[in-house]
Image (cartoon, helix red, strand yellow):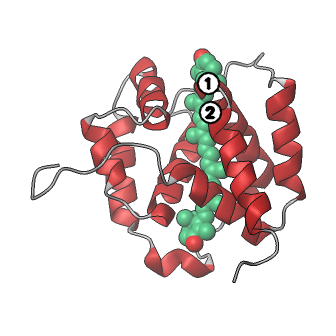
């Protein structure tokens, strides 16, 4: 059985993935600025989150130059096979979401490369932002999980990351 709205949610995540990489990052940022205040680390799914895993990946990115930080984010979206991509790939969908949330907070407090001040979303991305804003909170979360889940790379078999 499928719930009403499942298809809409899948479509939003797909439309998101169809944008150019930089547009995806910009849209994700605008989503954060719209809903950031309603995100609380004490959300219902919080018990399924590996906070320390998300934080240690975030700390690695935080220690890089701004250019490298941007490259890491582009690589994740491009599913490039990098060490960080593989570490990311081994996390649960909700932990991935927490990692992106930590990045956006880092942008807010100046430890992660900020958006260029004059950045304008394409009308396509703007449309998608409005669609996502119209979803209820649970559907938004599902959209974001579907969006961040396939990023990064497959972890290697065995102990090797
Ligand atoms: O120069 O169950 C451009 C938890 C242009 C708890 C750029 C949760 C060129 C458990 C590319 C634009 C909290 C995890 C530069 C639930 C250029 C739980 C840079 C919920 C510089 C449900 C762009 C979590 C950049 C949620 C750097 C809902 C863009 C989390 C970066 C939501 C954008 C997280 C980023 C969101 C966006 C994160 C990092 C919406 C992050 C958005």
Q: Position of residue 98 (x, y in %)?
A: 51, 58
Q: Is mark 2 within 8 Å of ligand 1?
A: yes
Residue count near mark 1 (Cα–Cα under 10 Å), binned few <14, some 14–19, many ≥20? some
State the residue position of label 1: 22
Query: 8 or 78, which is in the foreground?
Result: 8
Quadrant the N terminus occupies: bottom right
Name the foreground residue: 131 vs 39.
131
Q: In the drawing, does residue 115 fall left or right of residue 71? A: right
Is disc 1's CB within 8 Å of ligand 1?
A: yes
Where is residue 3 shown, x and y percent of the image? 76, 78
Label 2 Cα neighbours within 10 Å, binned few <14 / some 14-19 / many ≥20: some
Per the rendering, the mark at residue 25 is 2
Q: Position of residue 59 (x, y in %)?
A: 35, 45
Residue 56 against residue 24 in the figure, above or below: below
User: Quarter of the image holding residue 123?
Assistant: top right
Q: Image point 52% across, 76% down: which residue?
A: 46
């Amino acid at each position: 059985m499928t719930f009403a709205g499942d298809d809409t949610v899948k479509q939003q995540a797909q439309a998101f993935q169809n944008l150019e990489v930089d547009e995806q990052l910009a849209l994700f940022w605008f989503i954060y600025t719209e809903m950031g205040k309603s995100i609380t680390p004490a959300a219902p799914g919080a018990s399924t989150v590996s906070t320390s895993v998300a934080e240690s990946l975030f700390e690695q990115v935080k220690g890089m130059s701004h250019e490298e930080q941007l490259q890491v984010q582009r690589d994740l979206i491009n599913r490039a096979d990098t060490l960080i991509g593989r570490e990311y790939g081994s996390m649960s969908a909700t932990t991935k979401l927490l990692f992106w949330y930590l990045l956006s907070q880092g942008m807010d407090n100046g430890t992660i490369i900020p958006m260029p001040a004059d950045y304008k979303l394409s009308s396509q991305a703007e449309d998608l932002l409005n669609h996502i804003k119209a979803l209820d909170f649970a559907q938004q979360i599902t959209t974001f999980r579907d969006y961040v889940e396939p990023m990064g790379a497959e972890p290697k078999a065995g102990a090797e990351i």
